[in-house]
Image (cartoon, rainbow, N blue to C red):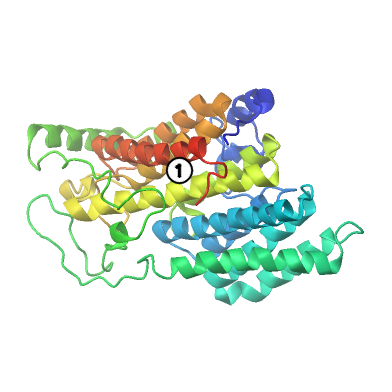
């Protein structure tokens, strides 16, 4: 069953976001902040949303934990996916039980199941924070108690949610995310340069992690990048250098806005936060919200898997390694260049969210394009990295859209 958002707030959502000083709008801006002291740049990209939805509230908590624990982007995408799939399966479990009993849908029971699944999953993913998550769970469930949902009923639903999360956890244990890499770094002209002072590259085995939507991490592997030293390559490198030499304040602003480096919600989390705000502004109910998060976060994880497959297939040198005069004001990631992770994540996210919120599709696509370009402005990627990353992400996103159109639940 496909669901589409009401168009009633799209004009406010995106037109207002560009100029508003409201921190809650900052993450949605399809254009970079324009005022020199604009609050959009100062706002945290993962700012939480005061929510009536358990799925939104617990995704906010997940982003906070990712930030505080400095989880890297590929692993963060996995955490978001595991959480949202557990939430969706909890909803499905409640609905199945309701149908079996012949009763009507009761939102408070769905809410309780999502809370329980979320607490179970986040306690597993962040064991040092388990006590805090359990305390939050108790508070959320206590707030639901009423004559229509007594303690025994909530306890039964809580068990459904926890069981749904445990089933996802069992599956996750064999997804390959903990694979050990045997260091083997190719060398030669045009290859990414390993710096022992920084350490080994980030997650070289990630392209082999089991995906949700793709058949394998290599399903959408792009063709090789331009040959190192070729005219096409030299022109691409010269473009990065030219931008580095003449970088404008606006280009730097864009690079910073989308940087999402270490100690942030990460690029997948940035799009997760956008989804949280869209869920609220379009007044999704819990079922549709969990469906949205499951599709989005599965696509984000798969986009990262496909991107990392390409990175460690081609091992392409970074622009600033090929030309040391290129500056990288937002930092240089410790892994190969081709393709851009920011572009892949953004292409997937904009495709999924654009299907769910069609009135916002154009703005979401513009945001994805800008997120990709931010890496060129930051001296981190070639233009072809961004173009191929967006293409890969969009192909992954199309798999999620196909599942949405062809399935009643839209989740695994």
Residue positioned 22% across, 33% down in the render: 239
Question: How many numbered discs sit on the rendered protein?
Answer: 1
Depth check: give the residue in front, 411 or 44.
Answer: 411
Q: Is residue 121 visible?
A: no
Q: Is residue 258 above or below residue 63?
A: above
Secondary structure type for disc 1: loop
Mark 1 lies on residue: 258
Q: In the image, residue 244 lies at what x, y percent?
A: 28, 38
Q: In the image, residue 229 lies at what x, y percent?
A: 7, 40
Q: Quadrant of the N terminus?
A: top right
Give residue 245's quadrant in the image.
top left
Depth check: give the residue in front, 220 or 24.
Answer: 220
Specify whether 272 is left or right of 12.
left
Give residue 385's quadrant in the image.
top left
Specify whether 189 is left or right of 78.
left
Residue positioned 26% across, 53% down in the render: 309
Q: In the image, residue 234 lies at what x, y percent?
A: 12, 36
Depth check: give the residue in front, 41 or 207.
Answer: 207
Residue positioned 50% across, 31% down in the render: 364
Estimate how packed mark 1 is, as few (under 14), some (14 to 19) or many (20 or more) residues with alpha carbons within 10 Å: many
Depth check: give the residue in front, 70 or 358.
Answer: 358
Specify whether 223 is left or right of 245.
left
Q: Is residue 11 above or below residue 274?
A: above
Q: In the image, residue 13 lies at what x, y percent?
A: 63, 30
Q: Is residue 410 visible?
A: yes
């Amino acid at each position: 069953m496909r669901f589409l958002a009401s168009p009633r707030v799209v004009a406010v959502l995106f037109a207002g976001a560009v100029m508003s000083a409201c921190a809650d709008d900052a993450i949605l801006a399809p254009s970079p902040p324009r005022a020199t002291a604009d609050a959009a740049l100062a706002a945290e990209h993962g700012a939480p949303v005061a929510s009536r939805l358990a799925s939104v509230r617990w995704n906010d908590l997940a982003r906070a934990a990712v930030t505080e624990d400095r989880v890297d982007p590929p692993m963060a995408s996995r955490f978001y996916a595991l959480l949202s799939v557990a939430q969706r399966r909890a909803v499905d479990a409640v609905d199945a039980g309701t149908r079996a009993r012949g009763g009507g849908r009761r939102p408070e029971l769905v809410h309780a199941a999502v809370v329980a699944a979320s607490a179970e999953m986040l306690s597993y993913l962040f064991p040092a924070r388990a006590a805090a998550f359990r305390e939050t769970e108790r508070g959320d469930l206590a707030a639901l108690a009423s004559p229509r949902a007594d303690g025994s009923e909530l306890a039964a639903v809580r068990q459904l949610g926890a069981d749904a999360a445990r089933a996802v956890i069992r599956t996750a244990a064999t997804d390959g995310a903990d694979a050990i890499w045997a260091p083997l770094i190719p060398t030669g002209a045009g290859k990414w340069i390993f710096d022992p002072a920084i350490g080994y590259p980030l997650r070289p085995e990630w392209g082999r992690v089991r995906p949700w939507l793709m058949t394998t991490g290599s399903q959408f592997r792009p063709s090789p990048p331009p040959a190192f030293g070729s005219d096409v390559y030299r022109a691409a490198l010269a473009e990065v250098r030219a931008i580095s030499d003449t970088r404008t304040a606006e280009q730097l602003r864009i690079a910073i806005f989308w940087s999402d480096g270490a100690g942030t919600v990460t690029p997948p989390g940035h799009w997760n936060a956008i989804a949280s705000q869209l869920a609220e502004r379009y007044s999704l109910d819990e079922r549709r919200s969990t469906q949205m998060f499951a599709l989005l976060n599965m696509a984000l994880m798969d986009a990262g898997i496909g991107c990392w497959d390409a990175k460690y297939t081609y091992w392409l040198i970074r622009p600033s390694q090929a030309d040391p005069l290129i500056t990288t004001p937002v930092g240089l990631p410790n892994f190969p260049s081709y393709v851009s992770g920011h572009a892949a994540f953004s292409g997937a996210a904009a495709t999924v969210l654009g299907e769910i919120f069609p009135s916002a599709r154009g703005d979401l696509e513009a945001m994805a394009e800008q997120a990709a370009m931010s890496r060129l402005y930051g001296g981190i990627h070639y233009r072809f990295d961004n173009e191929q990353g967006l293409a890969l992400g969009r192909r992954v996103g199309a798999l999620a859209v196909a599942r949405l159109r062809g399935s009643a639940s839209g989740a695994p």
